[in-house]
Amino acid sequence: MKKALLLISLMTLGLISYGQSSVSLLVDGANSQYTISRHIYGHFSEHLGRCIYDGYWVSESMPVPKKDRIRLDVVEALKKIKIPNLRWPGGCFADEYHWRDGIGPRNQRPTMINTNWGNVTEDNSFGTHEFLELCDLIGAEPFIVGNVGSGTVEELSKWVEYVNYDGISPMTNMRKQNGKEKPWGVTFWGIGNENWGCGGNMTPEYYSTQYRQYSSFAKNYPGTPLSKVACGPNSGDYKWTDVLMQSVATGRGGVWGIDFHYYTRPPRGNMGQGAPQGARPAGQQGQQNAPVQSQGSATNFTEQTYFATMRNAFRMEEYIIKHDSVMTKYDPQKRVALVVGEWGIWTDPEPGTNPRFLFQQNSLRDALIAGTHLNIFNNHCDRVKMAQLAQTINVLQAVILTEGTKMILTPTYHVFDLYKVHHDAKMIPVKFVSPDYILDDQRLPALNVSASQDSSGTVHITLVNIDPNKSITLSTTLNQIKWSTVTGEILTSAKITDINTFDKPETVKIAGFNGARKNGDLLNVVLPSKSVVLLTIK
Ligand code: AHR
């Protein structure tokens, strides 16, 4: 009786699983063809809420280590996960940002209203120089998004010149006067953001023409050929992809990638059955007067809500496959990248915070979503060559939260820490039939996986078990891979709702994993419920 009670309590606490499924995996080293670009592991930081201001960029008097006003504890944390690129200044903000307002002596910079995000006054103290200094400190490549919605062709053209030109020119002189002798040489430039919505409510035909014009005047200066990124589709808007690709993938001026956005939303009802809930009507997101629709709490959710949220997260793969097939009509050689420029879970803001600041907590659920997305991106790295999680600090699915001088790492941060081994490694296809995660007669694939081999020959496998109740036993064949040892690390916790807080910053953290064994040529793994695991095979 006592034993039964103990078992029930442990199960309730989530410390042991209710059951087990098993699966056979083939990690097919013979069919490794594509490289996982490190740029898949990028991040997005907008002038929104407390991401830039009070996130990276703090007051002179705040007693934390700083360079100028950039917080160095944040910089160090981002360096550790090796973030390869940072997308800035938006988001919706990008299409009302005028870069000239953000250069020169700070006390002479004009202010503006950030109409998308709470009508707060933007003092422009964080501008081009400050952003590029931040990227330099982190060691991330900048990805600057230009203003197409309310800017001009001349404005974007001169911004590129200011940032990239080393010869004699008015922009070079201005940059030097502002303290930067040599150009930065920024390669990644976005030509507008969400121009189907907050970036101008354009039709795909109209935007494509705009793209061709704006990109023609964004010049390649010596030593810095540009990788230009066009505004891509919202969620499942395949018409946008079709019209855009037809126009820009074949036109002059060139396009490096198209920037597709999809957010995972918790369901609005209980199970959220029916229409995809990540899709947003064009033009409504980010509008100041749009009602803030309830998305569901970041921390207080049932297993039913969890299940439906995971189902929405899986839509990412369906969208990638379908956009890829439209792109392939015009670009069979996959020269144009599908950039997933904004992704992540979007929940209700934390109670008591400004609803337009989009500050949300981050749970183990979010880490499972991050691990799943990154596995999807890795497995589609022939087309997905860049992605940015929204948004680094204090906004949406942040990897870092700050409160005054305190800083915590979220469960999602730890996923990026585990997965950094995939940067620029060769993707190895993994074949398996996933066991089901079943809830109330509905099913989702419980397991998702990706694998890669780095330049030293080490193989890494990242596995996600989304089932909150059952562990999975894996029997894995490593085809054409010589190996003798396996080690592992795991991210899990007692409950899917577990979070890190300023009082308890290490509830969800990485731990050693000893559930993997070599058994002859087979790799046997017991993957705990609700976990993300990294295996290192040498
Ligand atoms: O990330 C928040 C907002 O979501 C961005 O500003 C916009 O591009 C998207 O709608």
Image (tube, helix red, strand yellow):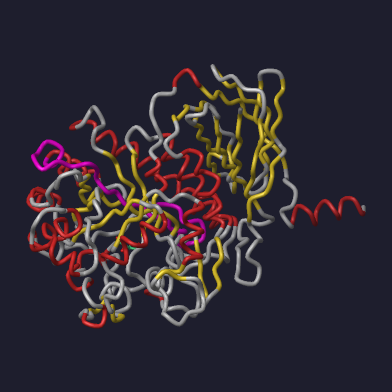
Left/right of residue 496 with respect to residue 371 in the rendered view: right
Question: What type of secondary structure mainly makes up the magenta span?
Answer: loop
Left/right of residue 533 with respect to residue 121 in the rendered view: right
Q: Where is 327 relative to 283, above or below? A: above
Q: Where is 499 relative to 470, above or below? A: below
Please report the residue visible at 24 percent of the width from the left and 31 percent of the height from the top: 328
Left/right of residue 506 with respect to residue 347 in the rendered view: right
In this orientation, which residue lies closer to the viewer: 43 or 21? 43
Where is residue 140? Give x, y as percent.
Answer: 38, 52
Q: Quadrant of residue 50?
A: bottom left
Dividing the image into 4 quarters, which one contains the C terminus?
top right
Left/right of residue 134 with respect to residue 249 in the rendered view: right
Q: Quadrant of residue 171?
A: bottom left
In this orientation, which residue lies closer to the viewer: 142 or 427? 142
In this view of the protein, can residue 357 be seen by the observer? no
| Callout count | 0
Q: Quadrant of residue 294?
A: bottom left
Where is residue 486? Give x, y as percent.
Answer: 66, 31
Q: Where is 83 relative to 30, above or below? A: below
The verdict on residue 494 being magenta is: no
In this orientation, which residue lies closer to the viewer: 326 or 5? 326
Where is residue 475? Give x, y as percent.
Answer: 65, 26
Give the residue at the far right of this rendering.
1
The residue range painted magenta reads 247-275
Where is residue 164? Give x, y as percent.
Answer: 19, 53
Please report the residue visible at 45 percent of the width from the left and 82 percent of the height from the top: 61
In this orientation, which residue lies closer to the viewer: 371 or 448? 371
- Where does ligand 1 appear, by image quarter? bottom left
